[in-house]
Amino acid sequence: MSAELLSQLAPGDKARIAGFSLPGESLSRLFEMGLTTGAAVEVVRFAPLGDPIDIKVRGYHLSLRKREAAGIQIERI
């Protein structure tokens, strides 16, 4: 069974971050923004062309590129 990715969620879906498969510099930037293993996230909306993705994490909104979201493994809650 393959891991689900943040990029696969639809608006309104909620999940917890389970892991990452991103290069080090991208990962450091996401950690600084509060995206850490175990953090709860909610997909709020997608931009009209599907990129970026607006998510809510730790009480604030954050925009991620779809390629970044594709490197974040999640568990639905």
Image (spheres, rainbow, N blue to C red):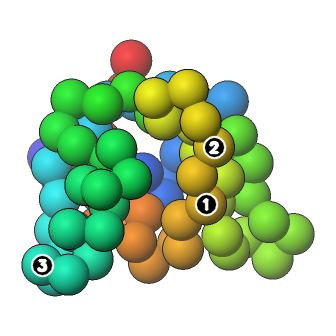
Q: CA distance from mark 2 to mark 1?
A: 7 Å
Q: Is residue 47 left or right of residue 13?
A: right
The quadrant where residue 24 appears: bottom left
Amino acid, disc 1: Ser
Q: Residue at the location (40% across, 72% down)?
A: 68
The quadrant where residue 64 appears: bottom right
Q: CA distance from mark 3 to mark 2?
A: 23 Å
Callout 1: SS: strand
Q: Residue at the location (30% across, 56% down)?
A: 32
Residue count near mark 2 (Cα–Cα under 10 Å), binned few <14, some 14–19, many ≥20: some
Of 66 and 4, the residue lying toward us: 66
Look at mark 2 in the image and give the residue it sits on.
61
Of 10 and 55, the residue lying toward us: 55
User: Could you say where residue 71 lies in the image, as x and y percent from the top left?
Assistant: 29, 67
- Could you say which disc has been placed on residue 76 in the image? none
Callout 3: SS: helix
Callout 2: SS: strand
Q: In the rendered image, is residue 5 in sight? A: no
Image label count: 3
Of 70 and 4, the residue lying toward us: 70
Of 24 and 5, the residue lying toward us: 24
Look at mark 3 in the image and give the residue it sits on.
24
Amino acid, disc 3: Gly
Q: Marks 2 and 1: CB-CB under 8 Å?
A: yes
Instruction: Choose the circle earlier in sequence order: 3 or 2.
Output: 3
Among all residues in the image, which is located at the extreme front?
32
Q: Is residue 51 above or below residue 64?
A: below
Look at mark 1 in the image and give the residue it sits on.
63
Instruction: Choose the circle earlier in sequence order: 1 or 3.
Output: 3
